[in-house]
Image (cartoon, rainbow, N blue to C red):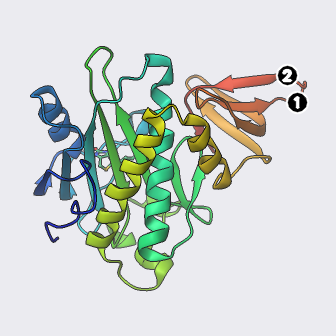
Amino acid sequence: MSPDAGARTRYVGRRTERHARVTSTNDVARDLAAAGAPEGTAVVADEQTGGRGRLGRPWASPPGGLWLSLVLRPRLPAHEAPRLGLAVGVAVARAIERATGVAVRLKWPNDLMVGDRKVGGVLVEAPAEAGWAVAGIGVNANVSLEALPPEVRERATTLEAAAGRPVDRDALLGEIFAEVEKAYEVLRGDGFATILRWWRDRAASLGERVTVRVPGEVVAGVAEGIDEDGALLVRLDDGSVRRLLAGEIG
Ligand code: BTN
């Protein structure tokens, strides 16, 4: 990949570490963050051997994908931390569309969907009191579907499959840097209402009946919206509303 992907931004991706193979770019970025790396520092790898997804799941990261992590220092109170994941998710969806023309929708909280298949995801790790956050972004860009485990393959797709041709990962990386910087600036400027509007405009399942797996239970109802903390609001059959802070729409 060319070293110019960060040329259009003020700080996101200006400093980029590239690796052929790492366990997880989030781990490399975490160590850089803890050592004082400047905000916006990016870590990109061609392959991850221990990629992590949300909810403690592994994240298959074969060559051909775009696996990256960004060091951010958002200074958000703990209860507002989910806002960062929503902002990054919306930014990556916009970036994919700009770089490839493939339409992407968001499944709460930040699954990147092409139709009903997942093409990417976002994992924000922000230890309490650390003063930094790592935003991990995984996009099945030119990954071969055969390289994904069978249980992932049946619910996943790739940008190459969606676009009908391999996508330019450098161009995509440059758009991701630019869109994340834009969304992050909006977020820091107290513009979460704007992020929410962008997110809702791309929401995949709002207004639909959903089942949501949350730790220890499955919640069924109609997904009515997300609130100021990024929580999903589900209208249950008894008419009450459950507010879910973490989980996965099935
Ligand atoms: C999800 O479960 O949807 C989130 C997936 C996030 C994967 C990315 S790939 C780059 C970064 N490094 C990791 O180990 N995970 C994230």
Q: Which residue is mark 2?
A: 240
Q: Secondary structure at mark 2?
A: loop
**Total tally of numbered discs in the picture:** 2
Q: Residue at x 73, y 43 (%)?
A: 210
Q: Residue at x 70, y 39 (%)?
A: 211
| Amino acid type for the residue under numbered disc 2 | Ser
Query: To which quarter of the image does residue 130 belong?
Result: top left
Q: Is residue 179 left or right of residue 42?
A: right
Q: Nearer the viewer, residue 34 or 165?
A: 34
Looking at this rendering, what residue extends furthest in the top direction? 129
Tell me residue 129's x, y (percent).
29, 14
Residue 175, placed above or below residue 53: below
- The residue that mark 1 highlights is 237
Q: Which one is in front, 248 or 6? A: 6
* Residue 178 % position (x, y): 35, 57
Let me know if residue 119 appears in the view: no
Q: Nearer the viewer, mark 2 or mark 1?
A: 2
